[in-house]
Image: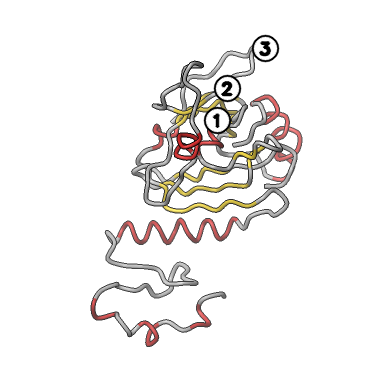
Amino acid sequence: MMAEELKAGCARPTGGLVGQPVPSPSEPISTTQKEERAMIQVGKPAPDFVSPAYHKGAFTNVKLSDHLGKWVVLCFYPGDFTFV
Amino acid sequence: MSVDSVFVHKMWNDHEISKMVKGGVPYPMLSDGGGKVGTAYGVYGEDAGVENRGRFIIDPDGVIQGYEVLTPPVGRHVGETLRQIQAFQLVRASKGTEATPSGWKPGRMTLKPGPDLVGKVWEVWKTDMAAD
């Protein structure tokens, strides 16, 4: 479940989707592609991603597909220091 | 998951949440700077630059079984999420032979969909079971 712990540093790590093509600047994303990408449907696979995380005192990375075989609740919220 | 950095997650956990929950947040607090993941899940609000309150139940095969998305001012009911997970787990364990009618909670009767049930739900399921 836990990936490697990250070294502390000044860089602000970011994550992103796994297995999604990165559009080149010469090929801007069309509106249709954008809409397709945002399509979420029950009964369909959850988009895979890797995200930096804070977990029990450590900075780490979390990949959704590492959790296959378990039930997962993925919860989004507007911001820290607000209610959930 | 929110657009906050992991450093802010640490501050929130260490200085506020750990005062409400012993030991702090037990699960990973994910960071989605830029909202790339939130955009893929349809919950990122570009105007405010933050994620809406989206909650996705993902099964052991990586398939989304249910989701709920609320605008920021209204909070969620965690008990309802747990109830839904219990229902999905029951259905999965039954390999789809059982279904959980409206208002189902653990211990309550399930339905066995099939030709014999058509037109007979009213005999076993009552409307007052829907909302208590």
Front: mark 2 or 1: 1
- Residue highlighted by disc 2: A14
Residue B26, position as x, y percentages in the image: 58, 39
Residue B120, position as x, y percentages in the image: 33, 85
Q: Please tell me if label 2 and label 1 are on a single chain.
A: no
Residue B82, position as x, y percentages in the image: 51, 57
Front: mark 1 or 3: 1
A43 left or right of B76 in image? left
Q: Are marks 1 and 3 in contact (CB under 8 Å)?
A: no
The three-letter code of the residue at mark 1 reads Lys
Q: Residue at x 53, y 28 (%)?
A: A51
Question: In which chain is the residue bearing label 1?
Answer: B
In the image, which disc is placed on residue B36? 1
Question: In which chain is the residue bearing label 3?
Answer: A
Quarter of the image where one finds residue A78: top right
- Secondary structure beneath dot 3 equals loop
- Residue highlighted by disc 3: A10
